Image: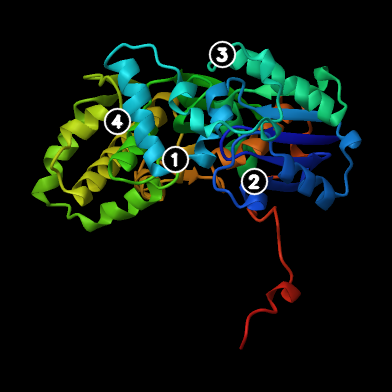
Amino acid sequence: MIVLGIHDGHNSGCAIFKNGKLICALSEERVTRKKNEYGFPFNSINFCLKFSKIKKNQIDQIAVSTKKLPPKYFLVKRNTTFKLEDYFKEQNEYWYKKIYLNKKVKYLDVFHNRKVKKKYLYYDFRKVKNEDDSIGLLNARRDYFSNFFSLDKSKIHFFDHHECHAYYGYYGSRNLNNKVCVVTLDGGGDGSNATIWKSKNGKLVEVYRTNIGNLGRMYRYITLSLGMKPTEHEFKVMGLAGYALDNDAYYKKILDIFRETLKVSGIKFKYKKKPKDNFFYFRDKLKNQRFDSIAYGIQKYLEEILTKWFLNISKKLKVNNFIFSGGVAQNVKASKKILESKSIKTLFVPPGPGDESLPIGAAYCYFAKNNFDKKKISSMHNPYIGIGFENKDLNFIRK
């Protein structure tokens, strides 16, 4: 049985499984050389089919990550085409007017000059009622997959964004016992940004889900306020945090600004004080503060609240073996802090736990839902599963 996993949101890509074995997986950006490609991964699909020596009509099932994708981001290929000034424009001319001025603003009016040509959109947007009609887009996506692969729509399966993250970490870890907990945390997907799952008989059972676990969004917009691209340069903020001192008087005030908002209560996220948004609120509060201290403050806050969350989960669910997936799991310094806790025995972070791994996670979801033999499913012990090279490709190197 051949299963094709697809993610067509930002950082799109595909993965091909044959009888549970991962044959090839590739992000679209690796082929187009455009960072964070958005939309149908035409090029990576063609590459993986050729690499795997599989024809389109041989695909038996298609597993797709994320049910609700906003049409407006598709129509401008937001993460692919946006420059730093576009992200500031998005805040000032779209979100500020909607949130603070309570005005009706159309995203595509603000970014009319960013609209992508129809031939690069692939899907039939005549079926999409408006720029926020994710259901209409879901139907257009399904129709296109069906036509492109000549496959009956009943064989095209859409899975929840966070469930894909969770199963990617779970099956990827090969730790399928009943004493492991999977935690996901990211900027957002399918209306949620944080989930907790507990394993049972080789499958995952959802324990908690929320859309206010806004750590990823806070970090994202601190990245922007520091003049760097969100959903891309967060690693620079993490590195910049190391330039501030732990006893630096500057960061204490900054840390208190973060602490007075989002907190952890038991295994749930709650607000002490809910900001109107995650950009303007913190930008104004942090005005005139040192840039390195801001980076230190958000990093330390992330480490504090994540560590507390994991410890509370461990106590509540009586587990000490964890799997961490989703975009925030890429913060290696925070993961290190979690693992240093005495109550945490193991912490597995799969290779590329952000959206680049969702095609694999979607296929894993399909296997789980259809009771596929778990022993035959590839784990993620090796992240090198895409474009490779041979010694002859390195002839340009001179001794």
Quadrant housing residue 226 = top left
Type of residue at label 2? Ser
Query: How many numbered marks are there?
Result: 4
Query: Is residue 275 rendered to the left or right of residue 139?
Result: left
Residue 249 marker: none
Which of the marked residues, 4 or 3, is nearer the chain's N terminus? Answer: 3
Query: Up-down: is 38 above or below 47?
Result: above
Q: Residues within 10 Å of mark 4 (few under 14, many from 20)?
A: many
Q: Residues within 10 Å of mark 3 (few under 14, many from 20)?
A: some
- The image's colouring method is rainbow
Whole-percent x and y of residue 78?
51, 34
Q: Is residue 298 visible?
A: yes
Which of the marked residues, 2 or 4, is nearer the chain's N terminus? Answer: 2
Q: Quadrant of the N terminus?
A: top right
Query: Is residue 218 rendered to the left or right of residue 367?
Result: left
Query: Is residue 375 rendered to the left or right of residue 384?
Result: right
Residue at 14%, 43% (x, y): give it.
Answer: 289
Whole-percent x and y of residue 131?
54, 17
Which of the marked residues, 4 or 1, is nearer the chain's N terminus? Answer: 1
Q: Is residue 178 visible?
A: no
Whole-percent x and y of residue 10?
56, 36
Type of residue at label 3? Asn
